[in-house]
Amino acid sequence: AALRAPARGTWAGSVRGELSGAAVRHRLRGGGVESLDLGNGSINLDLQPTGIDGRLLLDAGKTGRLEGQLTARQSTPDAGWRDWSANGQVRVDSDAVGFVDSYLTEIDRVTGRLRAELRVGGTIGAPLLNGDLNVSNAELDAYQINLALRQINFSAELRDNYRFNLGNFHA
């Protein structure tokens, strides 16, 4: 990593990182720890006074892959960083959806395959997400309400953060 800041306010620099055996650990209420293996990957970030370029790659082998890139540019000379135009994409292909039950306590177990392709637009301060999401061969259990869903398959569209169209739902 290298950063530099002149006496008058603008930052510039870069960050490069390699990840090996990366994981997210979540402490459960009962004291246990749940771990989501993210695999290996890299993160690259370049910051200039008028723009940002970033890339992320996580590869967990058979479990899945996450890759993304973001570019942000200053649109006018006096624009603050929140007003910089944003352009990017995120791709996810993973069967590691079991983490959902760590954050939604009403759900006890989730399995399945998640594929998503999202595009980022708008500005850094007000990003717009558009894209497609597909879930296949999913299972969901919520024991508190005696719910067990099997063979859940659906596709969804997200448009401009606000419209979420669910299609082809089967369970």
Image (cartoon, rainbow, N blue to C red):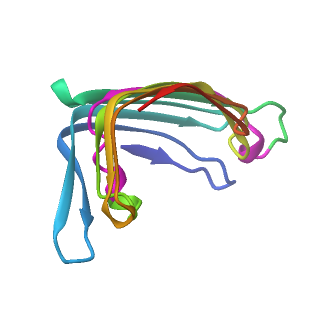
Outermost residue, front direction? Answer: 146
Q: Position of residue 145 (x, y in %)?
A: 39, 63
Q: Position of residue 62 (x, y in %)?
A: 17, 24
Q: Tell which of 18 and 142 is nearer to you.
A: 142
Q: Residue visible at 65% across and 47% down?
A: 10
Work out whether 41 lies above or below 109.
Answer: above
* Residue 88 appears in the picture as rendered: no
Q: Position of residue 64 (x, y in %)?
A: 26, 28
Residue 71 image-quadrant placement? top right
For the C terminus, the image quarter is top left
Residue 127 image-quadrant placement? top right
Q: Residue visible at 16% across and 71% down?
A: 32
Work out whether 122 lies above or below 99.
Answer: above
Magenta segment, which residues? 80-101
Q: Position of residue 126 (x, y in %)?
A: 73, 44
Decide whether residue 58 is among the magenta residues.
no
Residue 137 image-quadrant placement? top left
